[in-house]
Image (spheres, rainbow, N blue to C red):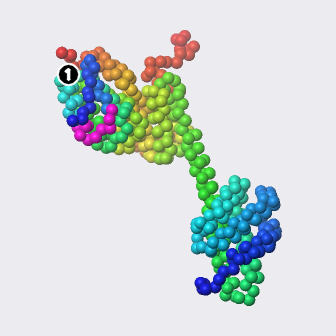
């Protein structure tokens, strides 16, 4: 079965969506990602959608849901590389993904995760690392 | 109109072309709608001659009900060309159409001579000629109007492009000074331009300056919020600057919620905050002394 690969980079998970998403693929990704966050105790999730050209309301909602789930599992989630057309479509669909962090590219996204984790560590209310 | 009566128009146009032309030109020269300031007599003569010869060819194929047929292609193309060039020269639509309509009187006079005492045949032919020339005249007006519309459309397009420049203020900071009223179509262009430039210049902060926007109503505010949301989705933060006192009042009175968006009164202060976000600052001699 077709799957979107999830890479582990230190305590972060990297999801790069290289194909156009269809509904089943999005559902599988949702399962896999939540599973892996718990298994690896991942602190950060980076979802790169720079190759994604077409979104519909379902995929938009799935993206938003995946990000929200990752956040509930206490992983800093960043969606990076959204194309202008996709951003406009999502806004028109009313899916503004409140609370989801975004960055222009993977590099900026990783820095954002690092900074967020750093802040958490300093604030001292982050989950103690086992 | 009886179908039985034969038309003498093609025959007349073929045989008496020269006489028709001379007559018609006399009329055009003495007409009040002649514009000697816009067109030379020689050109008018040439245009009239070509029109007559093309028309003669066209009617030889039959007096069709419409001028879109193959036989009329040459004459309607010629008229289209003429109409476009006259529109560019500054003729009014009436003056342009009069070129064709002025031929009516000449043609009718010659038809009267051709039919002599046959009233019925004359009436039929006058009807046919009248319909034909009306169609040709209307075609001229239509092309004239289309030409004008094309000009308007091009200007609108140009204005749209001109009015939405995205400028890079600093590495990572772009600014979009908006001028003029925002409607849905313009917002779409503005939004796309801004987002494209954010990607191109890798900017993490975009400043939308609305100093030049005369009024902000709920729709404009909605458009602005959409742009901000789309930029945020892509990973860039938006700052709205240049909010004039009256606009601030209007926004609050309308109950538009701008709490989610960072707003600044001037572009300068927006730029300062943007630099600060990127870890920079502007140092003036004053601030160094302090």
Task: Classify residue B28 by image quadrant.
Answer: bottom right
Look at 45% across and 31% down and name the residue there. Answer: B199
Residue B55: x %, y % from top left: 68, 68
Spot the residue most to the top: B289
Q: Would residue B54 be found to the left or right of residue A53 on screen? A: right
Check the image and report above or below for B215 versus A123: below
Residue A73: x %, y % from top left: 21, 27
Magenta stretch encompasses residue A93:
no
The front one of B17 and A109 is: B17
Look at 21% across and 16% down and name the residue there. Answer: A129
Check the image and report above or below for B99 versus A119: below
Report the chain holding disc 1. Answer: A
Look at 21% across and 35% down and name the residue there. Answer: A1
Check the image and report above or below for B104 versus A10: below
Look at 69% across and 75% down and name the residue there. Answer: B10
Q: Which residues are magenta?
A: A18-27
Name the quarter where the N terminus of chain B is drawn. Answer: bottom right
Instruction: Count neighbours of disc 1 (C-alpha within 10 A) and say few if under 14, some if 14 to 19, many if 20 or more.
Output: few
The front one of A22 and B73 is: B73
The front one of A41 and B177 is: A41
Task: Classify residue A33 by image quadrant.
Answer: top left
The front one of B269 and B280 is: B280
Residue matched to label 1: A40
């Amino acid at each position: 079965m077709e799957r979107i690969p999830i890479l582990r980079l230190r305590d972060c998970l990297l999801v790069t969506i290289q194909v156009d998403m269809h509904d089943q693929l999005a559902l599988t990704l949702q399962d896999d990602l939540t599973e892996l966050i718990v298994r690896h105790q991942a602190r950060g999730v980076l979802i790169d959608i720079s190759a994604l050209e077409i979104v519909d309301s379902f995929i938009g909602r799935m993206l938003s849901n995946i990000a929200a789930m990752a956040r509930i599992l206490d992983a800093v989630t960043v969606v990076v590389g959204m194309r202008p057309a996709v951003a406009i479509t999502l806004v028109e669909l009313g899916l503004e993904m409140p609370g989801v962090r975004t960055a222009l590219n993977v590099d900026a996204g990783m820095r954002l995760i690092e900074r967020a984790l750093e802040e958490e560590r300093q604030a001292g209310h982050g989950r103690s690392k086992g | 109109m009886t179908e039985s009566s034969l038309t003498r128009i093609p025959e007349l146009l073929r045989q008496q072309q020269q006489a028709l032309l001379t007559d018609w030109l006399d009329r055009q020269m003495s007409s009040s709608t002649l514009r000697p300031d816009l067109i030379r007599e020689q050109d008018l003569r040439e245009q009239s001659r070509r029109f007559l010869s093309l028309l003669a060819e066209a009617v030889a194929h039959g007096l069709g009900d419409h001028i879109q047929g193959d036989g009329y292609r040459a004459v309607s193309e010629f008229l289209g060309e003429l109409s476009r060039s006259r529109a560019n020269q500054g003729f009014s639509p009436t003056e342009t159409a009069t070129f064709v309509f002025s031929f009516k009187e000449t043609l009718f006079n010659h038809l009267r001579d051709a039919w002599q005492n046959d009233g019925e045949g004359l009436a039929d032919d006058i009807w046919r000629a009248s319909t034909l020339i009306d169609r040709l005249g209307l075609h001229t007006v239509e092309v004239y109007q289309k030409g004008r519309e094309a000009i308007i459309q091009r200007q609108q397009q140009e204005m749209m492009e001109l009015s939405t420049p995205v400028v890079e203020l600093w590495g990572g900071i772009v600014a979009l000074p908006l001028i003029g009223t925002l409607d849905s179509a313009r917002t779409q262009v503005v939004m796309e331009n801004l987002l494209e430039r954010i990607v191109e210049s890798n900017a993490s902060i975009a400043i939308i300056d609305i100093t030049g926007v005369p009024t902000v109503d709920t729709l404009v505010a909605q458009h602005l919020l959409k742009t901000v949301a789309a930029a945020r989705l892509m990973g860039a933060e938006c700052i709205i600057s240049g909010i004039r006192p009256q606009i601030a009042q209007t926004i609050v009175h309308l109950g538009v919620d701008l709490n989610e968006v960072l707003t600044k009164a001037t572009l300068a202060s927006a730029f300062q905050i943007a630099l600060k976000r990127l870890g920079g600052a502007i140092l003036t001699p004053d601030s160094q002394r302090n």
